[in-house]
Image (cartoon, coloured by chain):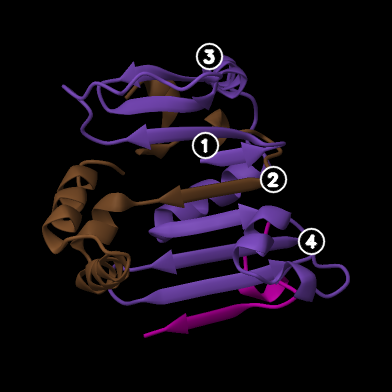
Chain colours: A purple, B brown
Amino acid sequence: MSVSRGRVLVMITGRLAGSTPPPPEAGMKYHILSGDAVLLGHAEAVDEALRRIAFPAHDTEQTLLAARLAAQYDFWACGGPGPAAMTGTQRALPPGINHIQLAVSLRDSFTVDYRPQGQLACHRAEDCCHAGAGTV
Amino acid sequence: MAPALQKLGQIDWRFAMPFADLTAGINFETIQNSSLARALVMQLAVCQGLAETDVQKLFGALGDID
């Protein structure tokens, strides 16, 4: 899922064959990409995504980070003030910290990885301004 | 899934907004299979007045979604 300027774009993957999505609300649309992938969201966002799929550009820091988090965690969010507001830490961010990365894994144990950071991508823990991770 | 959407067996995230305010992902299958996550969701749902059977149906419906 990605959100930008109030527009939402969601990709759902899984066993979707035989499922009939409900009619979209006004301004929203969905596009069935295959038997196991559907794009849905604001109509303009879905149309733009279809163009990106047809003519893929180079990976950005954000798409690389998304792929890495998706491979490692079961729930994750990263970006600007959105995730910060979600975790209730937006007002507490120190100067220079403008992005938040929150990831939760439930596979072998309950692991939370929370990283406020001064730049978008944080590929190694030592690159982060602050890093916190806990396992139960 | 269309080839353009996959890269090394995973979702090709280039479909996403390149400069999004927020990018997020949820693996419903893993969450469904986690007893801890199920217990947490069940507890939250019951506190909100939902019946356990309805929550079980929800888990069943989400189980096929990644």
Query: Is the residue under label 4 in contact with that under label 3 (CB below 8 Å)?
Result: no
Q: Point out the stretch of residues depicted in magenta.
A: A121-136
Front tag of 4 and 1: 4
Label 2: how many Cα within 10 Å (few below 14, some 14–19, many 20+): some
User: Distance of mark 3 from mark 1, alpha carbons?
Assistant: 13 Å
Kindly identify which residue carries mark 4: A98
Q: Are marks 4 and 2 on the same chain?
A: no
Going by the image, does A99 lie left or right of A27? right
Residue B59 locus on image (x, y percent):
20, 53
In what element is the residue under mark 2? loop
In what element is the residue under mark 4? loop
Which quarter of the picture shows residue A132? bottom right
Kindly identify which residue carries mark 3: A54
User: Distance of mark 4 from mark 1, alpha carbons?
Assistant: 22 Å
Residue A104 locus on image (x, y percent):
44, 67
Residue for point 69% across, 69% down: A116
Front tag of 3 and 4: 4
Label 3: how many Cα within 10 Å (few below 14, some 14–19, many 20+): few
Which one is in front, A114 or B5?
A: A114
Q: Are marks 3 and 1 on the same chain?
A: no
Q: Is residue A128 rendered magenta in the image?
A: yes
Kindly identify which residue carries mark 2: B21
Q: Are marks 3 and 4 on the same chain?
A: yes
Residue A58 locus on image (x, y percent):
65, 30
Give the residue type that dot 2 points to. Asp
